[in-house]
């Protein structure tokens, strides 16, 4: 597999980053994951706005424009056989001496990896499980998609498989937060609910797009602080992320939901696919 690092294409096995990079020493780095459709990245602008907000917050100066990063993704798409895939853009703070000395990071390492997509058929359901691990507090006012992923890893260790199950975090106060790799929504009496960013969840790009779609079709949407029993009393539950799109949840513990038969899930999933199809045919 061909990857991209600091403006150059490199075979994956030849990638090298110094152990003195502060992304390794202190976990100071941020990333975005994209999915391509016929070579085009969906919601690319939203991803880059989120990434650049994180970089600005930690004074990391990425020297590549959004257009240059997008061009690099397209170059990998071509080099790796015109195969749509999962792309991960990593910006790691860069090499400095040991110690928290820099006032800004002017030469971060910028990497793009590509991975083949191995997704189940559309509308494949998952089960949800409440995690014993609580969602940690974000390092900033808004949670960034950072290298500091130990809390997610801890939650992942509670599951035998992420393929069939999504672990659901609650906060230390008991509020429903998010999944290990997703944001969570539920439907009750025709209204859509999702945890507020106040819980410290990641402001997902797909989450934001689903909220936007719900508004466009006149679906009432509520963002707030909710306990587990409020989700468990729902009619429908689904999760979202950029790679898997919208995934219906069949049950959480012993509580059953509509899963893929949920009418709101079906409407929003159809709207998502229509948006992807419009992107494919746009100039």
Image (cartoon, helix red, strand yellow):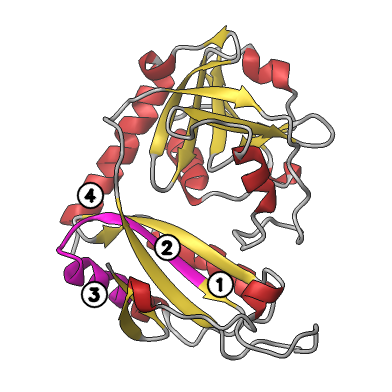
- CB under 8 Å between callouts 4 and 3? no
Spatial CA distance of label 2 from label 1 is 15 Å
Q: Is residue 276 magenta?
A: no
208, 26: nearer the viewer:
26
**Above or below for 60 versus 44:** below
Report, in whole angstroms, how far the alpha carbon at label 3 lies from the one at label 2.
14 Å
Q: The magenta stretch spans which residues?
A: 71-90
Asked whether disc 2 touches disc 1, contact meaning CB atoms under 8 Å apart, the reply is no
Quadrant location of the C terminus? bottom left
Quarter occupied by residue 195: top right
Quickly name the residue at label 3: 75
Residue pointed to by mark 1: 52
Q: Residues within 10 Å of mark 4 (few under 14, many from 20)?
A: few
Which numbered disc, 2 or 1, marks the residue that appears first in the sequence? 1
For this view, does 147 lie left or right of residue 276?
right
Q: Find numbered disc 3 in the image and state the secondary structure of the residue it sits on.
A: helix
Q: Which residue is mark 2?
A: 88
Q: Which residue is mark 4?
A: 278
Q: Which comes sooner in the sequence, label 3 or label 1?
A: 1
Q: Position of residue 225 (x, y in %)?
A: 75, 32
**Picture disc at residue 160:** none
Up-down relation of residue 119 to residue 227 (above or below): below
Q: Are marks 3 and 1 in contact (CB under 8 Å)?
A: no
Q: Residue at x 62, y 38 (%)?
A: 157
């Amino acid at each position: 597999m061909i990857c991209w690092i600091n403006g150059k294409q490199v075979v994956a096995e030849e990638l090298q980053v110094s152990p003195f990079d502060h992304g390794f020493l202190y976990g100071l780095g941020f990333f975005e994951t994209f999915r391509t459709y016929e070579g085009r990245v969906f919601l690319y602008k939203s991803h880059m706005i989120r990434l650049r907000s994180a970089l600005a917050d930690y004074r990391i100066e990425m020297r590549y424009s959004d257009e240059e990063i997008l061009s690099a993704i397209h170059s990998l798409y071509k080099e790796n056989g015109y195969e749509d895939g999962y792309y991960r853009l990593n910006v790691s703070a860069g090499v400095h001496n040991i110690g928290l000395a820099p006032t800004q990071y002017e030469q971060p390492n910028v990497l793009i990896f590509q991975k083949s997509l191995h997704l189940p058929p559309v509308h494949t359901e998952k089960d949800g499980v409440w995690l014993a691990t609580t969602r940690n507090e974000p390092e900033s006012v808004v949670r960034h998609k950072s290298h500091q992923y130990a809390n997610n890893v801890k939650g992942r260790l509670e599951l035998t498989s992420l393929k069939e199950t999504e672990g659901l975090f609650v906060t230390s106060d008991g509020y429903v937060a998010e999944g290990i790799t997703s944001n969570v929504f539920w439907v009750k009496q025709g209204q859509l609910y999702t945890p507020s960013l106040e819980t410290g969840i990641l402001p997902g790009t797909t989450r934001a797009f689903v909220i936007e779609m719900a508004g466009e079709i006149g679906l009432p949407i509520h963002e707030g602080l909710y306990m587990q029993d409020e989700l468990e009393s729902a009619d429908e539950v689904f999760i979202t992320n950029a790679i898997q799109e919208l995934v219906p949840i069949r049950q959480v513990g012993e509580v059953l939901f509509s899963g893929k038969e949920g009418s709101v899930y079906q409407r929003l999933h159809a709207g998502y696919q229509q948006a992807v199809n419009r992107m494919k045919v746009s100039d």
